[in-house]
């Protein structure tokens, strides 16, 4: 989290305009639906925010993408969605296109393959 805060602060200090804010907002939206480490920058998002486009253009790109790709179902990724007709896609929040929940994913947060069983139990 400190690494992320440093990146945003430096972007605000070095860049003209408010593209840093757009990156911050979009990164936080992504973090709310995906379980990725805060220290890992999203280079694609960074380039779209800081490539010289005006803030209005940058926001329009993200609004279009948000409409096309809704966030995955959080309950499904935890193991069980109670809704018969869910408005969120039932896809893995880690490896995205897969039709399993995060709790069954073989890819950990760093994008590396893990064992077939991932326990969510943590001793007190």
Image (cartoon, grey):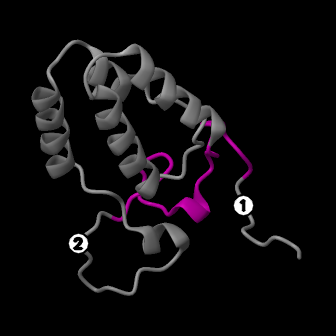
Q: Work out which residue is located at the far front of the displayed protein and give it.
A: 13
Residue 49 on image: x %, y % = 28, 25
Residue 5 on image: x %, y % = 55, 36
- Is residue 86 or residue 66 the one in the foreground? 66
Magenta stretch: dominant secondary structure: loop
Q: Is residue 99 magenta-colored?
A: yes
Look at the image and tell me in which quarter the N terminus lies. top right
- Is residue 13 or residue 3 the one in the foreground? 13
Q: Is residue 63 magenta-colored?
A: no
Q: Which residues are magenta?
A: 90-115
Instruction: Answer above or below: position of 76 versus 21.
Output: below
From the viewer's perspective, is 117 left or right of 47? right
Closer to the N terminus: mark 2 or mark 1? 2
Q: Residue at x 44, y 30 (%)?
A: 42
Look at the image and tell me in which quarter the C terminus lies. bottom right
Q: Which residue is mark 2?
A: 87
Residue 86 on image: x %, y % = 27, 76
């Amino acid at each position: 989290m400190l690494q992320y805060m440093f990146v945003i602060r430096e972007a605000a200090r070095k860049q003209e305009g408010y593209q840093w804010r757009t990156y911050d907002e979009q990164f936080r939206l992504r973090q709310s639906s995906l379980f990725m480490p805060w220290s890992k920058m999203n280079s694609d998002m960074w380039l779209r925010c800081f490539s010289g486009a005006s803030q209005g253009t940058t926001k329009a790109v993200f609004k279009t993408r948000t409409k096309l790709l809704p966030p995955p179902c959080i309950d499904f990724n935890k193991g069980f969605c109670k809704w018969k007709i869910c408005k969120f896609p039932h896809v893995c929040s880690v490896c995205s296109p897969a039709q399993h929940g995060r709790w069954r994913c073989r890819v950990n947060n760093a994008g590396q393959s893990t064992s077939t069983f991932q326990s969510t139990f943590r001793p007190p």
